[in-house]
Image (tube, rainbow, N blue to C red):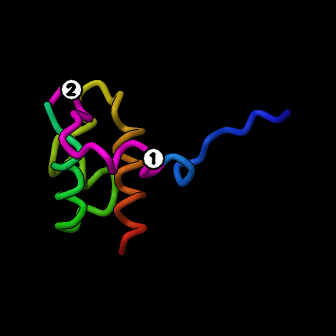
Amino acid sequence: MTNKIPQLSDLAGSQLSEDDERTTCFCHNVNVKTIREAIRRGADTVEKIKSETCASTGCGGCEWDVMMILEEELKKR
C-alpha cells in the first residue's frame, strides 16, 4: 500500500464546484463564487486573486483552496 500525496488536479472540483457560497477566506469573508468571478475576469494567478479579492492575505490558511479553485477554473478555458 502506498501513501499517495494528493495533487491539486486530484482534488480540484471535488467539493468546491458544489458550493460556490462556501466561505473560503474567513479572515476577509471571501466565498468561492467571489474567487471564481475574479478568475473569470482575468485573475490567473494566486497573487492576482489575492490582490483582487483579499483572499489568503490574512492568515494564509485558505491559500490551498484558492489554488484548487484557480486550477479548476483554468482547466475550463
User: Residue 14 shows which numbered tag?
Assistant: 1
Quadrant of res 77: bottom left
Residue at 35% in and 27% down = 61
Q: Earlier in the sequence, mark 1 or mark 2?
A: 1
In the image, what residue type sits under mark 1? Ser
Residue occupied by mark 2:
26
Q: Quadrant of the N terminus?
A: top right
* Horizontal relation, residue 70 to residue 36: left or right: right
Quadrant of res 9: bottom right
- For the record, the magenta segment spans 12-28
Question: Could you tell me residue 67's position as x and y percent?
Answer: 40, 48
Mark 2 nearby-residue class (10 Å; few <14, some 14–19, many ≥20) = some
Residue at 23% in and 36% down = 22
* Horizontal relation, residue 5 to residue 45: left or right: right
In the image, what residue type sits under mark 2? Phe
Q: Secondary structure at mark 1?
A: loop
Mark 1 nearby-residue class (10 Å; few <14, some 14–19, many ≥20) = few
Q: Nearer the viewer, residue 55 or 5?
A: 5
